[in-house]
Image (cartoon, coloured by chain):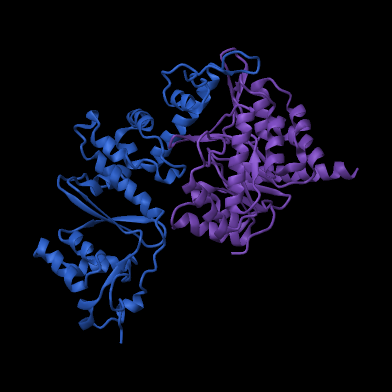
Chain colours: A blue, B purple
Amino acid sequence: MIAPAPPTDQAHLRAAILDPAQPVPQGLQDGAGRPAGRRFSVYRNNVAVSLTEALIDGFPACYRLLGDETFRGMAGAYLRVHPPASPLMMHFGQALPAFLDAAPQLARMRWMGDLARLELALRSAYHAADGAPLPHATLAAIPPEALPDQRFGLVPALRVLRSDWPVLSIHVKALDPTAPTAQPGAEDVLITRTDYDPQAHLLAPGDVAFLAALRAGDTLATAIAAGAAVNTDHDPAAILTLLMQTASLTASLTAAEPAVQTN
Amino acid sequence: MPGSPTLPAGPGVGYKPQHYNAILTDPAPVTWLEIHAENYMGDGGRPLAQLRHLAERFPISVHGVGLSIGGEGRLDPDHLARLKHLCDWLQPASFSEHLAWSTHDGAFLNDLLPLPYTAATLTRVADHIDELQEALGRRMLLENPSSYLAFAESEMSETDFLRAVADRTGCGLLLDVNNVFVSATNLGLDARAYVADFPIEKVGELHLGGHDEDHDDHGAPLLIDSHGRAVADPVWALLDVVLDRLGPAPLLIEWDTDVPDWPVLAAEAARGQAALTRAGERAAA
């Protein structure tokens, strides 16, 4: 016979902290030896409130659109199923998009999961490694005839998000009520980080294929062809200009030849 | 980056990013800063850039809040590696963690959870501190917790437990004066007796923070260690008792929620400086 685990082991405590419906574990008491009662609720409250606040901080647009009561309710359900997997709260909430996708009460707001994905991507860009962007002078010194053969890298903070919903327009409107109301339609989003604050930009059809080719280490000519294959009217100059203006291009890490030859 | 060998025996504050410009412009009377280790474990961006800049101007104390030293499971090797990486490049003046657990079976609960003071807990905590100190290649300070309840199975007092941990591992102690006041009030103990019994020779840093007031099921006072307001007057009075035993020491003001503007926090630090000065005068008299 194996003796039952004592009621104050950490598995029992963890379960009782995360589930207020469970009784307070035995063996916990006040200074006079009386059962701990609501003293145990301090820990329950600290855990639930601090994790809920972390989700509010991490998903401000979802919070605005769901409202305080609904968001806190969903956060309380989420944190019990998906408590943080590490002490790095900057990563907490990775499973929230899928959780929102599956939430029956959001059947009429199916875009909420993608909005959470966008907010996760912004947070991840904020904490991404610093890049070593090519200086404007280096880019400007590339002779036009050499451009097609150039390969570029992309700074670590760069993120691309594809959505069947107008996710960027919804995000902007959520945080700025004076912004235009989102119109139906899919949106592709690019997140850049020039210094420390990530910025989200709306991408044009063909941009995602263009960026994927650059990321794969292909030449600029190949990337342009990839964009045109998706959208015959694709304008590679526009996305290339955006990448330059946001200091998003680095020397290629994959090119067999030096990334930038200025001769 | 050249690290500072020790924390100065003056007032420090828990660093909040919203105070970055104020601290660089006019930090007085603050002479050192403490950061929560887990907030500086990203790959780059503003948090690390600010920390690099601040570390050129101020001694830094790295205060871990997520290692779960009192956890029943083994220390998370990934987190241990992250702490080592941070301490290796930052070379902080001090590293401290808590007598508490926060992770069980892969779930991090984001709170400092309580431990029974038993021989088994002592062995586990001491083993984890040995492992941590070996990994970091430095001595750590272990902080006394704030308690809202007690374990029926506890076999020794908190001060005896901390003394035994320090003796076994060679670690130092971080004495949180607010935690002493909170725990003593909540458990019906004598805060001054706790201070008198504390292994004071092991103390390398003091903490002070604000607490909230609530009540338990019987109407007894239940203080919550919230770090969301000014330090209470009885805690300042208890600090005087500590300083008369300890002498001058690095003294940190913690204010983590409802964070005030810099002048309010600087005024708390000035109150800490005044307490250190008065204690020095009493010692000289």
Q: Residue at x 56, y 33 (%)?
A: B226
In this rendering, position of residue B152 left or right of residue A212: right
Question: Which quarter of the picture shows residue B275?
Answer: top right
Residue A52, given in percent of the width and then of the height, sits at 41, 34
Question: Which quarter of the picture shows residue B141?
Answer: top right
Q: Nearer the viewer, residue A83 or A59?
A: A83
- How many numbered circles does the render carry? 0
Q: Residue furthest bottom?
A: A263
Q: Is residue B180 above or below residue B133?
A: above
Q: Nearer the viewer, residue B32 or A217?
A: A217
Q: Residue furthest left?
A: A232
Residue B221, given in percent of the width and then of the height, sits at 62, 19
Image quadrant holding the N terminus of chain B, namely bottom right
Q: Residue at x 61, y 55 (%)?
A: B92
In this rendering, position of residue A169 left or right of residue A80: left
- Could one spot residue B146 in this view of the protein? no
Q: Residue furthest front?
A: A1
Q: Is residue B14 above or below residue B178?
A: below
In this rendering, position of residue A204 left or right of residue B25: left
Q: Residue at x 63, y 39 (%)?
A: B126
- Could one spot residue B70 in this view of the protein? yes
In this rendering, position of residue B272 left or right of residue A145: right
Image quadrant holding the C terminus of chain B, namely top right
Q: Is residue B28 above or below residue B269?
A: below
Residue A170, given in percent of the width and then of the height, sits at 25, 44
Q: Nearer the viewer, residue B118 or A142?
A: B118
Q: Nearer the viewer, residue B130 or B212?
A: B130
Residue B54, given in percent of the width and then of the height, sits at 58, 58
